[in-house]
Image (cartoon, helix red, strand yellow):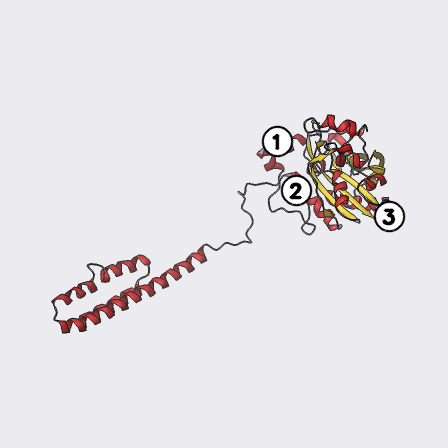
Amino acid sequence: MDDLDSLTNSLLAEIGRADSAAALEELRIAALGKKGTITGLVKTLGAMDAEERKVKGAAFNAAKDRIAAALDARRAEIAARELDARLAFERVDVTLPVRAEAQGRIHPVSQVTEEVIAIFAHMGFTLAEGPDVEDDWHNFTALNIPPDHPARQMHDTFYLQDDKAAAAPAGAGAGGNRPALLLRTHTSPVQIRHMQANRPPYRIIAPGRVYRSDSDMTHTPMFHQVEGLVIDRDIHMGHLKGCLEEFLRAIFGIPDLRYRLRPSHFPFTEPSAEMDIGCSRKGGVLKLGEGDDWLEILGCGMVHPRVLEYAGVDSNQWQGFAFGLGIDRIAMLKYGIPDLRAFFEADVRWLRHYGFAPLDVPTLSAGLNR
Ligand code: PHE
């Protein structure tokens, strides 16, 4: 019995000192394995008489159980300690700055879109959207551009398949004709869709892609606009002016930016105007907010009563203004990007130069500018 006790005690002590799962496994094999010390004692049972075997057998089993239990307990302790060590070592400090080698960049068009949204959201506008593939009626007719109106030519419209022929004579939606489909030439059809689907008053902006068959330094077949629409009971041109002044000064970050409203013409607004901002072009360099030159920046006006009626809004009760501006153009001006075509060439070197860090999210509190 003394052999067993001293063997058990020394094994338990060794188990208590073991400091890795591997060391424990070695101890287990040395004690309980096929050629282990305890196993060796168990084997001596065969040579004993029945009485002795009964007593010793019970003692051996008790010793085996104690050792197995000690091994389990120590294994759990070691596992817990290893986990603690790993957790301490692998801890991530989420307040660390983004690593310099982060590759993705935000496209200037996306950045400016977010900036525009942030500014108008602050003024209480909500977002609206419409489809890129429009029908003739929403893109033209409901905006007071009838089928034979010259403005249709000016829009350089992309029609889908043979829809141009189908559209011209009858006009879409009339006489059970299939509506002629096209790629929207401006975001103004979203005005119509929003008014048809909701009750006034309205205060929305609608950013999105628009398409015209045109391509040079400052034109691409696809570009981006933001439409704005404000309709209520007593909206007048003064609201339009104040709203757009606030917007332009915020987006360009120039508090005393000069601007002017110049009379213009759009079929869907009356009166119509274009907004110019003050700039200088000295030495071929365009600078905003200085000099005495002008740069056209957006189209706007009071929504034509006929447009409201087309959209199912009573023009005797409701009135307001609309505006449309080019996002790409604002990005070019704000960030000094010379050629519009490069916006859509998907050249990563260009994007690395003009793009924005992924976490550089425009907000009114943190500021819009880099
Ligand atoms: N839709 C016009 C364009 O694309 C812009 C505009 C929108 C003008 C709303 C007036 C009012 O040129």
Marked residue nearer the N-terminal end (3 or 2): 2
Q: Which amino acid does label 1 sit on?
A: Glu
Q: Which amino acid does the dot numbered 2 rest on?
A: Gln
Q: Is mark 3 on a helix, strand or loop?
A: loop
Quadrant where the N terminus is found in the figure = bottom left
Tell which of 30 and 41 is nearer to you.
41
Q: Can residue 146 be seen in this view?
A: yes
The numbered dot on residue 111 is 2
Q: Which of the 4 image quarters holds residue 205? A: top right
| Residue 237 percent across, percent down from the top left | 85, 44
Of all residues shown, which one is farthest toward the front?
A: 176
Task: Pick whichever, 300 or 7, lies toward us.
Answer: 300
- Nearer-N-terminus badge (3/1): 3
Query: What is the secondary structure assignment of the residue under circle 1?
Result: loop
Give the distance between the C-alpha atoms of the residues marked 2 and 1, in whole angstroms. 17 Å
Q: Can residue 254 be seen in this view?
A: no
Q: Is residue 329 above or below residue 8?
A: above
Mark drawn on residue 345: 1
Q: In this view, does 71 lie to the left or right of 115?
A: left
Q: Does the residue labelled 1 lie within 8 Å of ligand 1?
A: no
**Left or right: residue 86 compared with residue 26:** right
Image spot of residue 329 (x, y percent): 72, 35
Q: Which residue carries the number 3 mark?
A: 317
Q: Which amino acid does label 3 sit on?
A: Gln
Q: Residues within 10 Å of mark 3 (few under 14, many from 20)?
A: few
Q: In which quarter of the image is residue 287?
A: top right
Q: Compute the Cα span from label 3 to label 2.
A: 38 Å
Point out the quarter of the image occupied by ligand 1. Answer: top right
Q: The residue tagged with tag 2: helix, strand or loop?
A: helix
Q: Residues within 10 Å of mark 2 (few under 14, many from 20)?
A: many
Q: Which of labels 3 and 2 is toward the front?
A: 3
Q: Which of 280 and 21 is in front in this view?
A: 21
